[in-house]
Amino acid sequence: MSNLGLFMPTVFYTLVGFMGYTVYKDKTLPNFLNSFDPSNVGVILYVFTYVSIIMAVVMTYPLYFFEVRNTWLFFIDLVLGKKELFSK
């Protein structure tokens, strides 16, 4: 499930970057969203793009730290003697 959670934003960001370049070509700024102007695409699409990127970041941010948290909890249990490094 976490792979799907990381795969979907990757596809979304790739599509946004690719479409942004194809629309603005040489006028594309390093931050694509700075190239985006409501007068070019309309207010609804402009707001939708910003809200979509915000939602992608909010929904996937915890996934990046899930394994780090598990590793730290394992390390703490190891130090406290609750777990062994190598099972017998």
Image: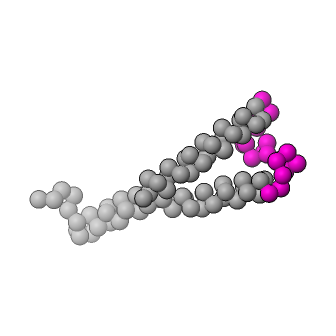
Residue drawn at point x = 63 percent, y = 60 percent: 55
From the viewer's perspective, tell me whether residue 36 is left or right of residue 59.
right
- Figure check: 58 above or below 49: below
Q: Residue at x 31, y 63 (%)?
A: 74
Residue 76, quarter of the rendered image: bottom left
Q: Which residues are magenta?
A: 26-44
- Check the image and name the residue furthest to the left: 88
> On screen, 72 above or below 20?
below
Residue farthest right in this picture = 39
**Residue 52 or 34: which is nearer the viewer?**
52
Asked whether 22 falls inside the magenta stretch, the response is no
State the image quarter where residue 1 is shown.
bottom left
Frontmost residue, 62 versus 39: 39
**Residue 83 point in image, percent of width and height:** 22, 66
Residue 64 can be seen in this image: no
The correct choice, above or below, for 71 with respect to 25 in the image is: below
Identify the residue shown where x is 71% and y is 35%: 21
x and y, in percent, of residue 28 in the image: 76, 36
Q: In the rendered image, which quarter contains the C terminus?
A: bottom left
Q: Is residue 85 left or right of residue 34?
A: left
Q: Position of residue 58 (x, y in %)?
A: 60, 61
Near-viewer residue (7 or 32): 7
